[in-house]
Amino acid sequence: MTAALNNLVARLRPLRLPRVCVAVTGADPAEMLDKADALVRDNTFLEFRLDYLPRPVLALPKIKQFTEYHPHVVLIATCRRAGNGGKFQGSIASQLDILWRAAAAGCQLLDLELQSAAHTKLEALNRLRSAASLILSYHDFHATKNLEETLGRMVVFPADFYKVVTTANTLYDNVEMMKFIERNSDRYSLIGLCMGEQGIISRVLGLRAGSIFTFAAVSEDEKTAPGQITARELQSTYRVEHVDAPTRVYGVVGNPVAHSLSPAVMNAALRRETVNAVYLLLHAKTLKDLLACVRDIPIHGLSVTMPYKEKIIEYLDNTDTHTTKIGACNTVVRAQDGKLYGFNTDTAGVVRPLQQRLELENAKVLVLGAGGAARAAVFGLKERGAEVSILNRTPGPAQKLARSARARTIKRSDLPKQFFDVIVNATPVGMGNTRESPLNQNEIRARYVFDMIYDPVETRLLKLAKAAGAQVIPGLEMFIHQAARQFEIWTGKPAPLAEMFSVVTKALAEREAIRQAAENKRH
Ligand code: NAP
């Protein structure tokens, strides 16, 4: 294709570009092109990071072949200079030359940093722009600040797209980026996002605000920017192709929160029930930061996890009486008037799986632990008429909980003499490994043993319980039922339980396989 024709095609593209561009790197041209070949089945928009190659020009003949083979693929060529956050060591003149040749090889878009443009004559920029669409880019690797001023410096240069990428140090930085895009996207074709772990949500919400597209990594190991997420995650978990202005935003908040399975489960449920909503990971370092985002994005609902379940209550406008008694909130709803209401669905997570198996009225239940999850279990079980005994490592919290819930405490030495309908583990003992158990086998005398821990799926406690003749209930059931109740509160629809189970089971199996592979590697 001639440069002029190429250019004409490129000019028609802004509204038709796919929303996710996958950044492709490689140690040499062959590796880079092999990766691109493997990607094109599922991704029609790729960025060749030529600056990652020791000699970028050597890739150009292969790129030409690639574009001839895959005329439907949209390609960005980037050869970012080292001083501007890339890896290219050459001069601006050689950078421009490589980009020009990349356009001749069929790349429809060229990415050039503002710093390079500022040292380039207008006619050279126009020449580049006659060959392909130009993305003028600016990266701030430290902060999200002076966005309008930056755009002001950029738009004096002619370009087809203006790309502003900053670093989020707080969740609220994402809101600043979104507002910036919203203010300017009707005048310019903008690409905006925040890098860094705190900036992950901007990769989805930026699109909702009007960013033309966003960037993704090929895989976990091949990220070209901090906080980048994989194309697969953006497309299949977050369904970014469908995110638009009316899309409601939900999320799980915690610190840390990176390993939460909630986005996989909740996004699958939203998709299955065709709710126009997206559920994000919100890594909040402070509640103040989080609540400012809830107000301004706005966020319609939150799943609350460690360490905020108790602390968030004072920031809410109201909680139901059950949640007030428990003193821990794992679900927040933002009403139409902007008020925040708190609920506790951990109770449903414990009670529902048990009610499917036995009558709770007068059932004898032992709860291990006296923290937030134990409190949700104890109050929920008492409300359904169960006789509840509490055993905790530290006696004080157990006694306090027993007093407030009208339950009783029990000594560990008395366990071998007692028989329970249900034992519920609400301690973290056994989490992430299969060697620790909160009880020994001779202490497990029960019909059912319910472990709240869901990773691993089969804990040491559950293995011992099986050996002691009890039936077991994995923490996965609690996880799904508390999430299902959240889904019902937020959407008013019944939750697609089977879909949710299948997604979380698959995710845990993948996690277990990775853990196993790492273990095998160590030995
Ligand atoms: P929490 O508020 O920190 O309470 C932890 C409780 O476990 C406390 O009573 C603590 O006793 C006890 N504990 C901690 N380490 C212990 C140890 N080494 N030996 C004996 N007891 C120990 O935590 P939480 O929010 O209640 O969560 C408890 C567990 O439930 C966690 O594993 C969590 O992942 C799980 N959970 C699962 C779900 C689900 O959906 N499946 C939902 C919520 C929670 P002290 O008072 O002596 O410190």
Image (cartoon, rainbow, N blue to C red):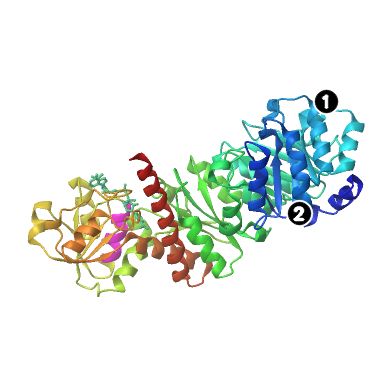
User: Observer-nearest residue: 170 or 25?
Assistant: 25
Q: Nearer the viewer, mark 1 or mark 2?
A: 2
Quadrant in the picture for residue 107: top right
Considering every residue shown, the one lying at the far left of the view is: 417
User: Observer-nearest residue: 12 or 518?
Assistant: 518
Looking at the rendering, the stretch of residues picked out in magenta corresponds to 372-381
The percent position of residue 183, horizontal first and vertical second, equals: 75, 46
User: Observer-nearest residue: 375 or 224?
Assistant: 224
The percent position of residue 101, horizontal first and vertical second, equals: 82, 38
User: Which element type, helix, strand or loop, lies under badge 1?
Assistant: loop
Relative side of 219 to 92, left or right = left
> How many labels were placed on the picture?
2
Asked whether mark 1 and ligand 1 are closer than 8 Å, the reply comes as: no
The percent position of residue 232, horizontal first and vertical second, equals: 58, 54
Asked whether mark 2 and ligand 1 are closer than 8 Å, the reply comes as: no
| Residue 445 located within the stretch drawn in magenta | no
Relative side of 86 to 306, left or right = right
Badge number at residue 69: 2
Please tell me which residue is depicted at 64% across the width and 57% down the height of the picture. Answer: 240
The CA distance from mark 1 to mark 2 is 36 Å
Q: Is residue 273 above or below residue 98?
A: below
Specify the quadrant that holds the C terminus.
top left
The percent position of residue 263, horizontal first and vertical second, equals: 50, 56
Residue 276 in view here? yes
Tag 2: amino acid? Tyr
Per the image, the residue denoted by label 1 is 119
* Crowd rating for badge 1 (residues with CA inside 10 Å; few <14, some 14–19, many 20+): few
User: Which element type, helix, strand or loop, lies under badge 2?
Assistant: helix
Mark positioned earlier in the residue sequence (1 or 2): 2
Tag 1: amino acid? His
* Crowd rating for badge 2 (residues with CA inside 10 Å; few <14, some 14–19, many 20+): few
Badge number at residue 100: none
